Amino acid sequence: MIDELLRESKQRMRGALEVLEDDLIAIRTGRASPALVERLQVEYYGSSLSLIQLATISVPESRQLLIRPFDTSSFKAIERAIQASDLGLTPNSDGKVIRLNLPPLTEERRRDLVKMVHSRLEDCRVAIRNIRRDSLKDMREFEKEKLISEDELKRGEDDLQDLTDEMVAEVDVIGDRKEKEIMEF
């Protein structure tokens, strides 16, 4: 019973880590990456779609993104979405494609991005601790209902804490890697 609860907790914590990695991919570093804009929401014919559903995104140069809309009528909507985003990029259009030139990051902007990364890391740590709290509550409930013994509860709590520590350490590794990527010139 406890093993099943620990497996479920591990799966939920892994899910939190995956969400964190998806969030961090969208944070700009010094290099161009389609992930910067592919989840950008575009208002198109009354519905909100992600940019990846409306266009092909490629990287012709290390500091440039090329967006080729599937439908030319979506050009203006895509440009508006890029300008309205917090990316700070200006789209350049020639009627067929939209180019996004990524200027080099300033030291101040890099620090701001690192702060944003730290905020996302802390959100992930909180999510992992909330999963631990829920699992502990379930274990104590099992013990109250005499489904597990006190010793099993103690062993389960220790295993859950070890799992939590392991996942938080993984969050730190992911954060350090992203921070180095941002601060790299």
Image (cartoon, grey):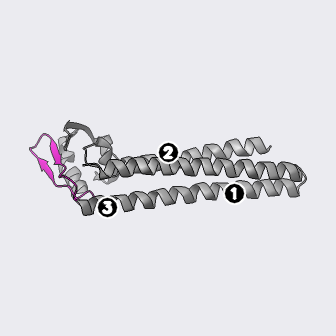
Total marks shown come to 3
Q: Nearer the viewer, mark 1 or mark 3?
A: 3
Which structural element holds mark 2? helix
Q: On the image, numbered disc 2 is attached to which residue?
A: 18
* Res. 40 in view: no
Quote the CA–CA distance across marks 2 and 1: 20 Å
Which structural element holds mark 1? helix
Horizontal relation, residue 131 to residue 62: left or right: right
Horizontal relation, residue 119 to residue 69: left or right: right
- Residue visible at 23% across and 37% down in the picture: 58
* Marks 2,1: beta carbons within 8 A: no
Q: On the image, numbered disc 3 is attached to which residue?
A: 111
* Marks 3,2: beta carbons within 8 A: no
Q: Residues within 10 Å of mark 1 (few under 14, many from 20)?
A: few
Type of amino acid at the residue the image marks with label 2: Glu
Please name the predominant secondary structure of the magenta segment in the image: loop
